[in-house]
Amino acid sequence: MKTANLSSLAVGYPSHVIGQSLILQADCFEWLSRVPENSIHAIITDPPYGVKEYEFDQLQKRANGNGGTWRIPPSFDGHMRSPLPRFTALNQKERESLRHFFVEWARLAVKALRPGGHVFIASNAFISHLTFSALVEGGLEFRGEIIRLVRTLRGGDRPKNAEKEFPQVSSMPRGCYEPWGLFRKPLPKGMTVADCLREFQTGGLRRLPNGNPFCDVIFSERTPGQERKIANHPSLKPQSLLRQLVYVALPLGEGIIVDPFMGSGSTVAAAEAQGLSCIGIERYREYFEMSTRAIPALAALDVSPWAQHPWGRQVRLFDEMLRSPIDPIGEHLAQARSSDAGRNGAAAGRRAPRKTPVGLF
Ligand SMILES: C[S@@+](CC[C@H](N)C(=O)[O-])C[C@H]1O[C@@H](n2cnc3c(N)ncnc32)[C@H](O)[C@@H]1O
C-alpha cells in the first residue's frame, strides 16, 4: 500500500510545511473525519486529559489567574509554580463527557489509521482508567501502558488542615510516573504481524538501534528549561521522551505519524529530529503559531545531556538486564527460596512464617 502525499492530507486547512512534516490549524475531530481511510501509520499524542482544561473559557481563566480547572500546586520549596489542571475535581457529568470525547475520537482514529497502526496517548494516573476504556469502546485494541518515570508535582501532601496532627501521613502517594496508553488498530482477521508489516508497514514496534526491544518503562525528566523557553505551552513534553516514542512508532522507519493535539509541536519536532514525517494538528491559533517557530528550534536541540544524567545509569542497568541471559529477579527469588527451604528444612511441608522485611526503608 502506497503512502499518501503529505500535502494532500492538509484537506483544505491552513497549513505549513516544516522539513518533511506538515502542521495544520484545525479541529482534529473534523480533520480525522476528512482524511482518507487507512492513510496514517501511527498516532503519538498528549490530549487534553480531562477534556475541559483546554476549552476556551478555562484557558481564559488560566490567563487571568482566576480559578477554573487550573490551580497553582502547593509550594514546598519557595519556588513559584505554574498552574496545573486538577483532574480530581471532575464531576460525574464531566467524566461522562470525557468518555464520550474519547470514544468518538477513537472511532475517527480507527478509520484514519492503517490496520496495525499504533497509538501512544499520554494520560494521568487519576483518569487513565476512564480514557483507556473509552478508547477501547471506540474500537482500539489495548496493548498495554508505557510508564514514564518522572517526578510530577502530584500527591505526597499531609492531610489538609491537619498537617501537624498527622505528620506521619500523606493522603496519597507522591506521583512519580505518567501513564501512556498503547493501542493498536486491530489487524484484519487472519492477518499476522508479518503480513501487516508487508502490506501496511505497521503492526509492530521498531527495535532500538542496538537490537533490543523497546521497553515499556522510560526513565524520564521534567521538561527542561531550555525547551520551555522555546515553547511556552502549559503541557510541553520533553524531546528526550518524544524522540524515543517517534522512533519506535514506525516499525520499518517509514510512514506518517500524526499528533492530533499538537500544542506547540513537540512531537513534530521530535519526528523532524529523527528524519521522520509527522502531521501536527492544533485548534488554537496562538499555539499553532507558536509551533511554527518552536518546531525547528526544538528539533535542533541536542538532548544527549540527559543521557549523562545519573538516571542515565539506570537506563544502562535496565538495558543490561534486558540483554542478560539470566533473569536477575528470578535468580534472586530462586536463591531466597532455596535458602528458606534450607532454614525451614525441619518444618518441611509447613508454610514458613511471614518475615518482617528488613532494611527496606
Ligand atoms: C495537552 S496539550 C498538548 C501539548 C503538547 N504535548 C506540547 O508539548 O506542546 C493539548 C493541545 O490540544 C489542543 N486541542 C484541544 N482540543 C483540540 C481539538 N479538538 N483539535 C485540535 N487541537 C485540540 C489544545 O489547544 C492543546 O494545545
Image (cartoon, rainbow, N blue to C red):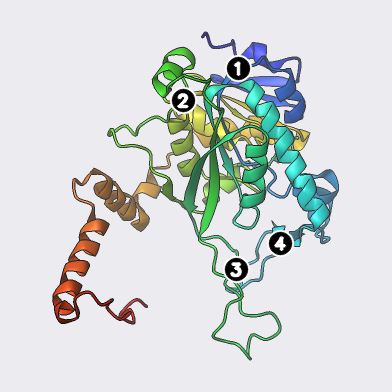
N-terminal-most mark, 1 or 4:
1
In space, the residues marked 3 and 1 are separated at their CA atoms by: 41 Å
Find disc 3 in the rendering and name its residue. 155
The residues bearing labels 1 and 4 have C-alpha atoms spaced at a distance of: 37 Å
* Mark 2 vs mark 4, CA separation in Å: 35 Å
Q: Which of marks 2 and 3 is nearer the N terminus?
A: 3
Q: Name the amino acid type tagged 1.
A: Asn
Quick one: label 2 or label 1, which is nearer the N terminus?
1
Q: Earlier in the sequence, mark 3 or mark 4?
A: 4
Q: Residues within 10 Å of mark 1 (few under 14, many from 20)?
A: some
Residue type marked 3: Gly
Q: Sequence order check: which comes first, mark 3 or mark 1? A: 1
For the residue pair 87 and 358, the one nearer the viewer reads as: 358
Q: Residue furthest top?
A: 2
Residue at 64% over, 44% down = 133
Residue, disc 2: 203
Tell me the SS state at disc 4. Answer: helix
The reply to whether residue 52 is visible in this rendering is: no
Q: Quadrant of ligand 1?
A: top right
Q: What residue type is labelled 4?
A: Thr
Residue denoted by label 4: 88
What amino acid does circle 2 point to?
Answer: Gly
Q: Which of marks 2 and 4 is nearer the N terminus?
A: 4
Q: Which residue is drawn at 44% across and 28% down?
A: 274
Q: Where is residue 327 in the image (x, y as percent from the top left)?
A: 23, 52
